[in-house]
Image (tube, rainbow, N blue to C red):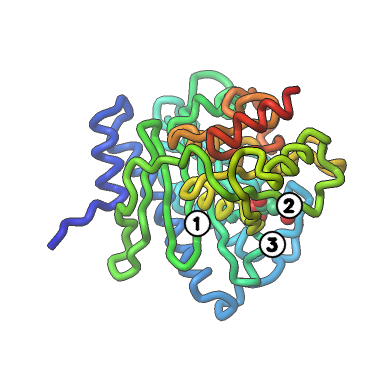
Amino acid sequence: MAMITTVQQHILQEQREQKEASGTFSWLLSGITLATKMVEAKIRAGGLTGMYGAAGAENVQGEQQQKLDVYANEALLHCLGMRDSVAALVSEEDEEPVRINRDPDGGKYIIVFDPLDGSSNIDVNVNVGTIFSVLRRAPGELEASILRPGYQQVAAGYVVYGPSTVLVYTTGNGVHGFTLDNSIGAYVLSAERMRMPEQGTYYSVNEAHAAEWPGAYRAYVDRLRAGGLGREYSSRYIGSLVADFHRTLLKGGVFLYPPTTKQPKGKLRLLYEANPLAMIAEQAGGMATDGAGRVLDIVPEGIHQRTSFCVGSRVEMEALAEGVRA
Ligand code: AHG
Ligand code: MN
Ligand code: MN
């Protein structure tokens, strides 16, 4: 029987090669994967569990919370809240960080997450996801440990709930993909050292906002449409960042969420959307910018700070930098 490698085994192998205390980090990751399996079970059952629809409250973003947003958030808080290696949890759905272990010697990690990404797609049975980022708790004020540039992330990952449920993560030593095998309830290694193609044939952007983008983005998309990068492009936009990103990781191309008049700083959130995906993109040979500079160099000022977000293959991203910087 071809022996499988589960994500827990893989992270332990990774830790042996790295400085991270092996047991602690893999135990932490198991809290995240357990929560995603709880979410997957709810999604798999769809509307049968009464999980569709709005929860009837607004979140800190002023957005209508979906029932599944709330469920996913509670699952992550529950599964991670019992790991004493966790100093605090930062969620899209909670205004303030949730403190877990105040003992600076105990609580070594801060987990930042978007519990359910792509909420607008839940009720129409389209891929949604969970995105997470792991920071180490430094001595001093908790807030200072959270508001650090993305290049200081210890790990980053996401789960995309689709025809299959796939977990992709990195600890800074390459990008690895796992597929949930529900017959044994484990994420099984399915893609080691994933690399983003140098150039793709898809661009991914919400064209409805095109009139609101800065001109350089319109010129860039026109250039892609006109075959200016030597290839014919097709457009793909799912509206769930995790799904649009996952396709870009596998097939290459570029995903853009430019500034708009409504969201002059961009819509996507730096800490739990742009940073984790930027770390994965760079680890796979791709690039991620806010149009001007590297996402991972941005020093956050607030935990729910938004940013414009452009991520994808080297060729498309270098062409974008030429256009937007000019
Ligand atoms: P969330 O559901 O966590 O709020 O994220 C939704 C985000 C992201 O998933 C997606 O890329 C983007 O919203 C889509 O925004 P538009 O509908 O404005 O294109
Ligand atoms: Mn999101
Ligand atoms: Mn969300």
Residue at the extreme bottom of the image, as rendered:
48
Q: Position of residue 99 (x, y in %)?
A: 55, 38
Mark 3: amino acid: Ser
The answer to whether 55 is drawn above or below residue 309 in the figure is below
Q: Establish whether ligand 1 lies closer than 8 Å to the Cβ of label 3.
A: yes
Along the line of sight, the residue nearer the viewer: 90 or 166: 166
Cα separation between marks 1 and 3: 15 Å
Numbered circle sitting on residue 120: 3
The tag earlier along the polypeptide, 2 or 1, is 1
Tag 2 secondary structure: loop
Q: State left or right for residue 25 relative to residue 202.
A: left
Q: Residue at x 38, y 43 (%)?
A: 194
Relative to 49, residue 174 above or below: above
Q: Is residue 229 left or right of residue 153?
A: right
Of label 2 and label 3, which has the lower sequence position? 3
Quarter of the view holding residue 64: bottom right
The answer to whether the residue bearing label 2 lies less than 8 angstroms from the nearest atom of ligand 1 is: yes
The residues bearing labels 2 and 3 have C-alpha atoms spaced at a distance of 14 Å
Q: Is mark 1 within 8 Å of ligand 1?
A: no
Res. 101 in view = no
Q: Nearer the viewer, residue 205 or 141?
A: 205
Q: Residue at x 65, y 60 (%)?
A: 119
Instruction: Please name the residue that numbered disc 2 is placed on.
Output: 206
In contact (CB < 8 Å): disc 1 and disc 3: no
Residue position for label 1: 160
In this image, 223 relative to 35: left or right?
A: right
